[in-house]
Image (cartoon, rainbow, N blue to C red):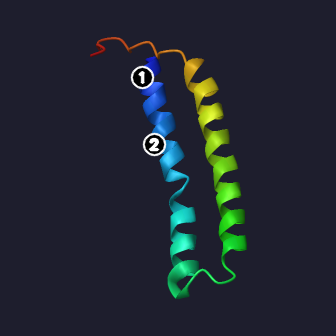
Amino acid sequence: MTAMSIRRVQAVCFVLAHIPLAAAATVLAADGLQGDLGPITAIFAATLVTAVSLVIYLGHALSQARPIAPRDGWTTP
């Protein structure tokens, strides 16, 4: 896997990890932000920790991955 492919996977996972934050913030802020900033901030912090952990883990896991040898009769693109 190339470095650019690894960065793309990391970026997509980082964005996908923030979907619950967007959903929770939308629901909580539907009737105004009065008193909802605490839970939204906590959800943001948890989401940020998750996303950063995913990026770090994927960077290590994918950079150490070895290509799989093709089977007999198969070719790689």
Residue at image mark 2? 12
Residue 1 appears anywhere in the view: no
Identify the residue at horizontal 53%, vertical 15% (top origin). 66
Q: Is residue 64 above or below residue 10?
A: above
**Residue located 55% across and 25% down the image:** 62
Residue at 51% from the left image edge and 83% from the top image edge:
30
Q: Would residue 74 appear left or right of 47 to someone viewing this image?
A: left
The residue to which callout 1 is attached is 4
Placement of 68 over or under 55, stated as above or below: above
Q: Quadrant of residue 39?
A: bottom right
- Where in the figure is residue 9, as x and y percent of width and height? 46, 35
Q: Disc 1 residue type?
A: Met
Q: Secondary structure at mark 2?
A: helix
Where residue 52 appears, as percent x and y from the top left, is 64, 41
Observer able to see residue 23: yes
Tell which of 67 and 32 is nearer to you. 32
Q: Quadrant of the N terminus?
A: top left
Above or below residue 39? Residue 1 is above
